Amino acid sequence: MRVTATVNGRVHSAEGVRPTESLLDLLREHLHLPGAKNACEQGECGSCTVYLDGETVCACLVAAGQAEGREVVTVEGIGGGRSSSLQEAFLTCGAVQCGFCTPGLLVSAHALLARCPQPDDRQIREALSGNLCRCTGYEKIIEAVRMVAEGGSR
Amino acid sequence: MTFHSPTRWADALAVRAEHPQAVPIAGGTDAMVELNSGRRRPDRLLDLSRIAEVSGWDTDGGTVRAGAGITHTAIVAQLAESAPALAQAASTVGSPQIRNRATLGGNIATASPAGDTLPTLLACGAAVELHSVGGARTVALADFVTGPKRTQLAPDELIAAVLFPAATGPQHFSKVGVRAAMIIAVCSFAVALFPDRRSVGTGIGAAAPTPRAAVEAQDFAAEVLPWDSLGHLDPAVAGYFGDLVAKAADPIDDVRGTAQYRRHALAVIARRALIWAWDDLRGAVPCG
Ligand SMILES: Cc1cc2nc3c(=O)[nH]c(=O)nc-3n(C[C@H](O)[C@H](O)[C@H](O)COP(=O)(O)OP(=O)(O)OC[C@H]3O[C@@H](n4cnc5c(N)ncnc54)[C@H](O)[C@@H]3O)c2cc1C
Ligand code: FES
Ligand code: FES
């Protein structure tokens, strides 16, 4: 089937999408946007986190057809083309090791700061609770989010 | 292989009638896990995510009617007053990403013994409204879920809504797990006080083949709670209530815990939930 969606502000169409494929397959395999990562396909790890109509979702659990006509923003889109201050803060704080979890964490953290610009640590932990990281131990990630919150910009 | 994506409820029911083997998919947080793992290979999907008619809620004051498509995020934001225990349970489901998609109807249709909304809905005496092209029927939730992941849903039916009385008193939901987020309950318990009719509702999760009410415990509490004086809750009453809840469970040993642990934990969380709910009720009334 054919699926058309707005991704990072541009209308994209893909042909030959199988109805059981996910939004993650649509992005990575059909639209060649590899930012959202595929790790578990079970909703457990959050490495595939993207915005769908303004809300964060696990792209692996959305059927590709459910994204038809909708607005998707991936990690490639949150910096508005340039790397955002959140992305810079992840680098500065050492919140990236292997980097596999980073795109999903950036989208979750971006959503938190949009909703709640000055989160406390409890709110940061809750907002990132659906994103697993096997490398950093999370402290550096929380520090990076805190840094942007205190700096007052994204 | 076909993907049906109706925008009207009547059209969804028509697809359901014509293709009963089509798998309904709402938030996809259970259904996509099965598709991705290859456990299920349907030749048709019926997408319910575009149907605005079933994704909201309304109330006539006394009764709340929550559409099957309402998400857990919306439950937390919008139903905390009329269904406090349901909102507490919804806030413990998965992660923000899961709650943004996962629907109430999906949680009920999955009918997991550990489905977190179910004990809270049982505590309120909820009913499920089922629709087909042939009409509608309403079934008590306690009867709708017939076994682990088994329900009374007919092949041509869809869950349209859940009906329950709006809260008239305090409610509490407690869930035992190894961390606060992303956890399937080891066991869970919900209590709802309805001071207007002096009744107490309960729901036990993850400690029997289906979520179930602890009928003896709730009848006992309704009988002995000092509704008139709103006096202190006798600790022995709370303790006995906890024991009756544990007795009503029928837990198993599995990777998340032993049957013995579940019974013990249930007695503890049920006792505390009753104490908290009763204290809330006393606090809410001037000069309690
Ligand atoms: C990482 C992760 C964490 C989770 N954590 C929890 C948790 O803490 N607690 C918990 O209870 N659950 C949890 N779940 C399970 C799941 O999120 C819930 O059961 C959720 O409510 C399912 O809703 P859905 O809309 O996503 O259902 P879907 O996946 O869309 O559908 C689930 C089932 O219900 C059927 N269905 C859906 N809507 C209808 C309808 N209107 N009428 C008839 N049938 C219908 C579908 O055919 C399917 O069989 C978790 C899942 C994941 C992936
Ligand atoms: S790949 Fe989607 S949550 Fe892990
Ligand atoms: S940096 Fe390796 S998983 Fe997070």
Image (cartoon, coloured by chain):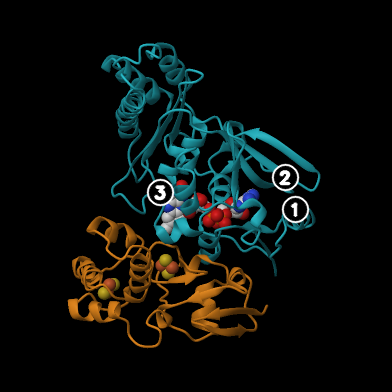
Residue B110 visible in rendering:
yes
Which residue is painted at 46% across and 18% down in the image? B216
Q: Which mark is residue B91?
A: 3
Q: Which residue is mark 2?
A: B131
- In percent of width and height, residue A112 lies at 35, 65
- In percent of width and height, residue A102 lies at 32, 75
Tell which of B233 and A38 is nearer to you: B233
Q: Which mark is residue B107?
A: none
Q: Marks 1 and 2, how far apart in space?
A: 8 Å
Residue A40 visible in rendering:
no
Subunit of label 2: B
Q: Are marks 1 and 2 in contact (CB under 8 Å)?
A: yes
Which residue is painted at 36% across and 20% down in the image? B241
Q: Which chain is cyan?
A: B
Q: How many marks?
A: 3
Q: Specify the quadrant of the image occupied by residue B276.
A: top left
Kind of residue indicated by mark 1: Leu
Which residue is painted at 30% across and 34% down in the image? B261
Kind of residue indicated by mark 3: Ser
